[in-house]
Amino acid sequence: MRGVFRLNPGPWPLAPGPVFLALLLSSCTHPTPLPILGQVPAFHLTAQSGQPFDSASLSGHIWVADFIYTTCPGPCPMMSSRMTRLQSSTTETPDVKLISFTVDPENDTPAVLTEYGKHFKADPARWTFLTGDRAVLNVLGLNAFHLNSVDGSLVHSTRFTLVDRQARIRGYYSSEEDGFLPKLLHDLRQLEAEKS
């Protein structure tokens, strides 16, 4: 038969496979924006240096927060070790701040928090430990972060909270889960790419 071109029904060497098509299509999509889960109100506490800490100093910064206490026999050392890993993983982004709120303000004085921070190799320019008025800490833990009360019971959440440049909560991450740090870092990088 003249003029008829027949295609070989076998596999085409240049045909794009499903993996190639998925990669091609995914490169054209934008990541889903992280949800806005709450707003952290302005607050004033005391840093481990003994100096007053105004939350306005976090304005324009992405930050990660947790609640700990220095004599904790349970999860706090593990949480602070993971915060140390987060600090190391973000050395190239010094604008990312780390905030650890105490749930034991009567015992966690600035001097105690300073020693605790040294034990975990906290960079005081990036990782701040906060103490102060129990009522302020309670409002933050219970009503702002929705994690725990600061009522003297020393019961607290083991989650880290990702906060954006406008003090909006954008994610919660259980520090007890094995894969939480890569997910937190991924979301942190996504926030860095967002326009302010």
Image (cartoon, helix red, strand yellow):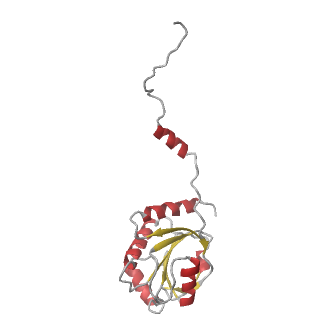
| x and y percentages locating residue 126 in the rendered image | 49, 74
* The C terminus - image quarter: bottom right
| x and y percentages locating residue 161 in the rendered image | 51, 71
In depth, the one of 98 and 146 nearer the eye is 146
| Looking at the image, residue 3 lies above or below residue 164 | above
| x and y percentages locating residue 49 in the rendered image | 49, 86
| Looking at the image, residue 62 lies above or below residue 110 | above
Spot the residue most to the top.
Answer: 2
Q: Residue at x 57, y 59 (%)?
A: 193
| Looking at the image, residue 71 lies above or below residue 10 | below
Report the number of numbered marks.
0
Using the rendered view, name the quadrant where residue 3 is placed: top right
In depth, the one of 152 and 28 nearer the eye is 152
| Looking at the image, residue 112 lies above or below residue 33 | below
In depth, the one of 102 and 5 nearer the eye is 5
| x and y percentages locating residue 104 in the rendered image | 46, 88
Q: Residue at x 47, y 38 (%)?
A: 18
Spot the residue most to the bottom.
Answer: 106
In depth, the one of 182 and 126 nearer the eye is 182
